[in-house]
Image: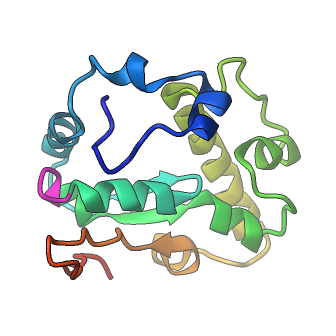
Amino acid sequence: MRPPADVPVTSFDVEQTGVTAAMLAGGPEACEVMAARDARFGALPYRLVAHSAHTEATLIGGQREHCPVMAAIALVCTVRLARLVELGSHSLERVAGRLGLPIPANRHRALPDAALTAQEFVRLLIEGVRAGRWRTVLEVQAAAGLCVKPAADRSGASAQSGLF
């Protein structure tokens, strides 16, 4: 997808992923993609899981007008879970390595990273249950959840989040 105007493709992004702004320029607009994803959700409750979920919270918050259902869904951060089960460094690759998960060859692409994050999430849930850190989804959410960051309106004030 073409990133929103307030989310530029940085040199770090290009170095890490090989994806340039020119490569994304012909893609669908973020508002279209977010609205299409939002339409796929039925009745709540859901949880969205992400590694370093604050990034997704910022993107969703900035697009909340186009994805109001998604903006109301709690996010669970696998970085926070990894910290709680004391896995040391918290990069996606290092957590995967500590959990014995293989790193995909095409790392830093959306689908392989999402699949790796899902595998990590399951393993971190199991580790947390074994350590007695959580037993329920609500306990996991309390331990590692975060809110979608509200989008700033034109005056600079923030809109209220629909999350806990």
Find residue 90 and report its image quarter: bottom right
Q: As rendered, which of 155 and 119 lies closer to the eye?
A: 155
Q: As rendered, which of 49 and 34 lies closer to the eye?
A: 34
Question: Does the magenta segment cover residue 67?
Answer: yes
Image position, residue 163 (x, y; %): 29, 76
Question: Does the magenta segment cover residue 63?
Answer: no
Q: Residue at x 78, y 29 (%)?
A: 102
Residue 1 placement, left or right of 141:
left
Q: Which residues are magenta?
A: 64-68
Residue 82 placement, left or right of 139:
right
Q: As rendered, which of 53 and 21 lies closer to the eye?
A: 21
- Give the main secondary structure of the magenta stretch: loop
Find residue 44 and report its image quarter: bottom left
Find residue 125 and report its image quarter: bottom right
Q: Residue at x 76, y 29 (%)?
A: 103
Image position, residue 86 (x, y; %): 84, 69
Image position, residue 63 (x, y; %): 22, 54
Residue 83 placement, left or right of 26:
right
Image position, residue 2 (x, y; %): 30, 30
